[in-house]
Image (spheres, helix red, strand yellow):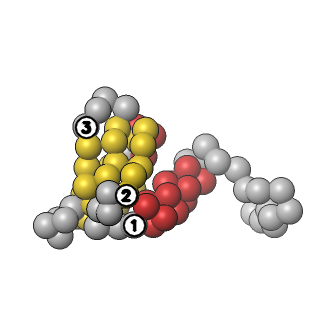
Amino acid sequence: MVQLTRLNGKRFSLNAIYIEVIESFPDTTITLTNGHKYVVKESEQEVYASITSFYREINMLSLRKGSEVVDHE
């Protein structure tokens, strides 16, 4: 889940797995796979960074080549 802010200032969580499109009109508009749209205060880049972090957290996105991998043993 990613934490976002509606234009009225209210915070909410959105399941990033269902995000299909992120656009700036100039407000950032997120379209889900079911067609629902959300307009948020965060920039397109901030949303993308939150999604990337979420994917790494749930192990859907691995570290890039050359990045250090920490061994927790």
- In the image, is 65 to the left or to the right of 35? right
Tag 2 residue = 24
Q: Does the CB distance between marks 1 and 2 fall below 8 Å?
A: yes
Report the Cα–Cα distance between label 1 and label 2: 8 Å
Considering only vertical position in the picture, is 28 above or below 22?
below
Considering only vertical position in the picture, is 30 above or below 44?
above
The quadrant holding residue 60 is top right
Residue 52 position, x and y percent, is 55, 56
For the C terminus, the quadrant is: bottom right
Query: Can residue 36 be seen at all in this image of the molecule?
Result: yes
| Amino acid at pointer 3 | His
Tag 1 residue = 43
Tag 3 residue = 36
* N-terminal label among 1 and 2: 2
Task: Name the front one of labels 2 and 3.
Answer: 2
Considering only vertical position in the picture, is 18 above or below 69?
above
Q: Residues within 10 Å of mark 2 (few under 14, many from 20)?
A: few
